[in-house]
Image: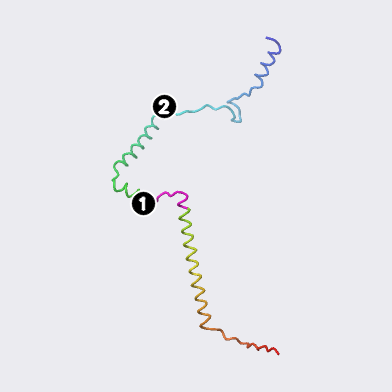
């Protein structure tokens, strides 16, 4: 080996970060912990049991309950249909407000005609010569 190669290899070794497990700051490479074979099997068994219970409950459920629960659910509307429904609702509200305004105006007019307020000051007529 040439001297230059030796220097390069020494620098590479020296520049590598070292991780010591006995360092005081707790920073370093940690060993990965995986589930044991028995733990994995018990987890898979418990998942299978819950799936079996769910499927058994669906099978034993009476047909009437299944139909009634599906009929109770609201229909999913497309975006356009939802917009149309909301526009219709708003239009109905506007029409109702317009009717109420008209009723109020009519009531005000009838009240004004029935009881005119007597004026305290009389106006003098203006004559032109």
Label 2, residues with CA under 10 Å away: few <14, some 14-19, many ≥20 = few
Magenta segment, prevailing SS (helix, strand or loop):
loop
Q: Nearer the viewer, mark 2 or mark 1?
A: 1
Magenta stretch: residue 122 in it? no
Q: Is 24 located above or below residue 63 in the figure? A: above
112 relative position to 57: left or right: right
Q: In this figure, which colouring scheme has been used for the structure?
A: rainbow
Q: Nearer the viewer, residue 113 or 35?
A: 113
Q: What element carries label 2?
A: helix
Q: Nearer the viewer, residue 19 or 103?
A: 103
40 relative position to 118: left or right: left
Magenta stretch: residue 76 in it? yes
Which residue sits at x=36%, y=37%? 51
Which residue sits at x=66%, y=19%? 12
Label number found at residue 37: 2
Label number found at residue 38: none
Query: Could you say where residue 7 lies in the image, as x and y percent from the top left?
Result: 70, 15
Q: Is 115 located above or below residue 22 in the figure? A: below
Query: Could you say where residue 91 lies in the image, as x and y percent from the top left?
Result: 48, 61
| Upstream in sequence: badge 2 or badge 1 | 2
Q: Is 33 located above or below residue 76 in the figure? A: above
Which residue sits at x=59%, y=30%? 27
Q: Is mark 1 on a helix, strand or loop?
A: helix
Quadrant position of the N terminus in the picture: top right
- Give the labeled residue for mark 1: 72
Query: Could you say where residue 87 lies in the image, as x and y percent from the top left?
Result: 48, 57
Q: Quadrant of residue 22?
A: top right
Which residue sits at x=45%, y=48%? 78
Query: Could you say where residue 53 lies in the image, as x and y percent from the top left?
Result: 33, 39
Q: Give the range drawn in magenta.
A: 73-82
């Amino acid at each position: 080996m040439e001297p230059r190669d030796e220097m390069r290899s020494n620098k590479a070794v020296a520049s590598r970060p070292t991780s010591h497990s006995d360092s005081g700051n707790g920073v370093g490479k940690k060993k990965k912990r995986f589930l044991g074979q028995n733990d994995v099997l018990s987890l898979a068994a418990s998942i299978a049991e819950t799936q079996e219970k769910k499927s058994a409950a669906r099978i034993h459920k009476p047909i009437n309950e299944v139909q009634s629960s599906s009929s109770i659910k609201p229909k999913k509307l497309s975006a356009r249909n939802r917009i149309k429904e909301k526009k219709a609702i708003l239009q109905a509200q506007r029409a109702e407000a317009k009717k109420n305004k008209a009723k109020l105006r009519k009531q005000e007019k009838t009240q004004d005609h029935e009881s005119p307020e007597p004026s305290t000051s009389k106006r003098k007529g203006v004559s032109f010569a």
